[in-house]
Image (tube, rainbow, N blue to C red):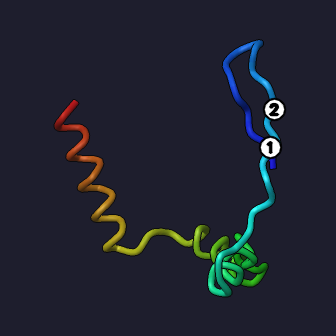
């Protein structure tokens, strides 16, 4: 891992020591995948293609109306 010290042209790279986990819980959390697997992503993409539900549409319409009133 690398950090920067200084500003502009005088900035230099500073080498940092490797990350060390303090306990097993941190180690497990730190090694988890940061992104969901392909199945979850596919489901999310499919849901994004669906039109909004009636409740979602009404909420969006109200947000839009509230914003137009403030402008």
Residue at 75% x, 77% y: name it: 31
Disc 1 from disc 2: Cα separation:
6 Å
Reply above or below: 53 against 60: below
Q: Residue furthest bottom?
A: 24
Does residue 61 appear to the left or right of 47 in the view shown?
left
Look at 74% across and 68% down and name the residue there. 20
Q: In this orientation, which residue lies closer to the viewer: 38 or 21?
A: 21
Residue placed at 73% from the left, 32% from the top? 4
Element class at badge 2: strand
Q: Which residue is mark 1?
A: 2
Residue 46 position within the rendered picture, expressed as x and y whole percent measured from the top left:
65, 75
Hey, which quadrant is residue 47 in on the image? bottom right
Using the image, determine if residue 54 lies above or below residue 62.
below
Q: Which residue matches tag 2?
A: 13
Helix, strand or loop at disc 1? strand
Residue 13 coordinates in the image, percent (x, y): 81, 32
> Where is residue 48 drawn, in percent x and y?
59, 68
Residue contact between numbered discs 1 and 2, judged by CB atoms under 8 Å: yes
Is 36 displayed left or right of 56 in the figure? right
Report which quarter residue 21 is drawn in: bottom right
Which quarter of the rendered picture does the C terminus lie within?
top left
Depth order, front residue of 4/43:
4
Please state the horizontal and vertical placement of residue 29, each as a whole percent of the image. Answer: 66, 79
| Residue at screen point 29% across, 47% down | 64
Marks 1 and 2, the one that precedes in the sequence? 1
**Going by the image, does 7 lie left or right of 66?**
right
């Amino acid at each position: 891992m690398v950090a920067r010290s200084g500003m502009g042209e005088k900035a230099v790279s500073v080498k940092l020591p490797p990350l060390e986990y303090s306990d097993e819980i941190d180690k497990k959390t730190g090694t988890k995948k940061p992104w969901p697997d392909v199945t979850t992503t596919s489901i999310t993409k499919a849901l994004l293609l669906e039109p909004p539900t009636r409740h979602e549409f009404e909420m969006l319409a109200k947000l839009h109306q509230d914003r137009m009133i403030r402008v």
